[in-house]
Image (cartoon, grey):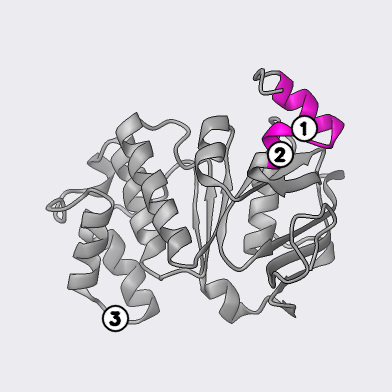
Amino acid sequence: MRDLYGYLDADVASGLSAQGLHYASGGQDLIKDLSLVLPESGVHCLMGPNGAGKSLTLRLLHGLLTGQTGTLTWRGTVVSAKEQAAQAMVFQKPVLLRRSVAANVDFVLKSRRAADPIFRDALLKRVGLEGRNGQPARLLSGGEQQRLALARALAIKPRVLFLDEPTASLDPASARVIEDILIEERENGTLVVLVTHDIGQAQRLSDSVAFVADGRVVEHRTTDAFFHTPTSQEARAYLSNFMIL
């Protein structure tokens, strides 16, 4: 299957597919006939200028917002509540409970199945928070809070992981931990959809880049092709600001 911009080859099964999404709010058309087809796994970036609609697109793909028109499917079937429950989201600003580090992860585990201290502690070790179980989550540094937010998302073992600029304001060490985990998730077969303004991050992590401009995906290509030979005028203008072309 191929999407509108030729990213997927005919022998690659589509995982998450959005067709003709339209979203309006306050009398303004914010997302306009947006279509995007992603495979079942890999890291795929949404890029574009400020105000282009990247975060709105991410929320529509995740089902946090519902478009006035258009369809959202997984493996060719309209996304169900069960499929949405197998997705997780990490926001740019961490959303944490006023509880301990361990209790934040336990809350997610208990809501999905049952408490699992061994799995929880393994998750905390994975994000570099080993031994911090009893510390109040809100007293962590910004980078630590974001890593805890990622651990909460991973607690459901998501099939699709959405992230909205998760490393935008982080120290290099925290950003590296998160990037390494996203690479591991790709290897585990997870579909990772990442909004980023970081050119280097997109080049390091992503298998493809979907460029959003004025509420539409105007180009979706493999990462190497996007950065070396972008086809849309909008992407070429954007990348020229970073002297990529």
Pick whichever, 132 or 128, lies toward us. 128
Distance of label 3 from label 2 (alpha carbons): 43 Å
Check contact, mark 1 vs mark 2: CB within 8 A: yes
Using the rendered image of the protein, determine whether residue 198 is visible from the camera's viewpoint: no
Residue 222 screen position, x and y as percent:
68, 48
* 192 in magenta: no
Tag 1 residue: 235
10 Å crowding of disc 1: few (<14), some (14-19), many (20+)? many
Specify few, some or many for label 2: CA neighbours under 10 Å numbering under 14, 14-19, or 20 or more.
many
The quarter holding residue 27 reads: top right
Q: Residue 25 carries which label?
A: none
Magenta region: 225-240
**Residue drawn at 51 percent across, 45 percent down:** 205
**How far across and how far down the image is residue 55, in percent?**
64, 45
Mark 1 and mark 2 lie on one chain; the one further toward the N terminus is 2
The residue to which callout 3 is attached is 114
Give me the residue at 59% from left, 77% from top. Answer: 83
Tell me if residue 179 comes above or below residue 171 in the rendering. below
Q: In this view, does 205 lie to the left or right of 132?
A: right
Three-letter amino acid code at the position of disc 1: Ala
Frontmost of labels 1 and 2 is 2
Mark positioned earlier in the residue sequence (3 or 2): 3
Q: Earlier in the sequence, mark 3 or mark 1?
A: 3
Q: Position of residue 118 (x, y in %)?
A: 18, 71
Q: Magenta stretch: residue 234 in it?
A: yes
Quadrant of the snapshot with the C terminus: top right
Q: Which amino acid does label 2 sit on?
A: Phe
Q: Mark 2 points at which residue?
A: 226
Q: Residue at x 78, y 28 (%)?
A: 236
Labels 3 & 1 near each other (Cβ < 8 A): no
The kind of secondary structure element at disc 2 is helix
Whether residue 134 is visible = yes
